[in-house]
Image: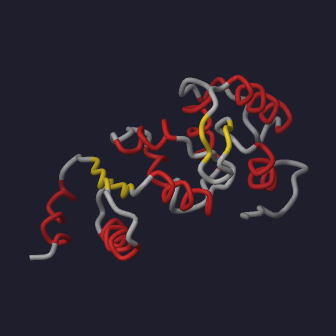
Amino acid sequence: MEIYQLMKPLQDLPVWLVIRLCTDEKHVIDYWNDIDKELEIEMDVIDDFVGDAGEIYNVNNWLIYGEPLHRMREFGSSIKEMDHLDEKLLGHDEMLVIVAALLFEGKVKDIPRPEMNWSAFISAVKKQNREASRNYDPISQKPAGWIHEANLISCYKSNTPGGSQACTIC
């Protein structure tokens, strides 16, 4: 019996499943990512720290994927948006949840709304990012905060009043 078939009954249960892979072999990662796409389960496939950092950077290059964030995902964070970090560019509301979790103790209400006041939003993020603990960024291989501010601006200012119309993914 295939693992997919064995896991299918989990769709009817209120579970959050984290598959923590102990390999960076592409065929194994692809296999589990395909299962994640097929099943209607809250499921996150986590591979190694550097591999996940690269996957996340490819779609959300504004986020510095530090080891504490990796550990939080491995242990099954209840923040649903964490599952989308390596899948797609987060929408504005999803981005706000992640920024709040990393810089504002999870309090989205403490962040100025970017669609209402982009300048206040980016100023608040910059201030908190400067004060945040430093992480090792496996992409740049240097210490960094949680947010790559220029990339955040590039990706999200486009949908705010007076913003540009393009998001650059490096």
- What x and y, as percent, mark residue 43? 33, 55
- What x and y, as percent, mark residue 137? 62, 45
Residue at position x 39%, y 39% from top?
77
Is 15 or 50 nearer to us in this picture?
50
* Quadrant including the C terminus: bottom right
Query: Seen from this angle, which residue lies furthest front?
Result: 141
* Quadrant including the N terminus: bottom left
Instruction: Judge from the rendering whether residue 21 lies leftward or rightward of residue 54; answer left or right.
Output: left
Residue 76 falls in image quadrant = top left
Residue 130 falls in image quadrant = top right
Q: How many marks?
A: 0
Q: Is residue 107 above or below residue 59?
A: above
Is 82 or 160 nearer to us in this picture?
82
Its colouring scheme is: secondary structure
Residue at position x 39%, y 57% from top?
47
Residue 6 falls in image quadrant = bottom left
Residue at position x 86%, y 35% from top?
119
- What x and y, as percent, mark residue 55? 54, 61
Is 43 or 71 nearer to us in this picture?
71
- What x and y, as percent, mark residue 42? 32, 53
Residue at position x 77%, y 26% from top?
127
Instruction: Judge from the rendering whether residue 86 lies leftward or rightward of residue 2; answer left or right.
Output: right
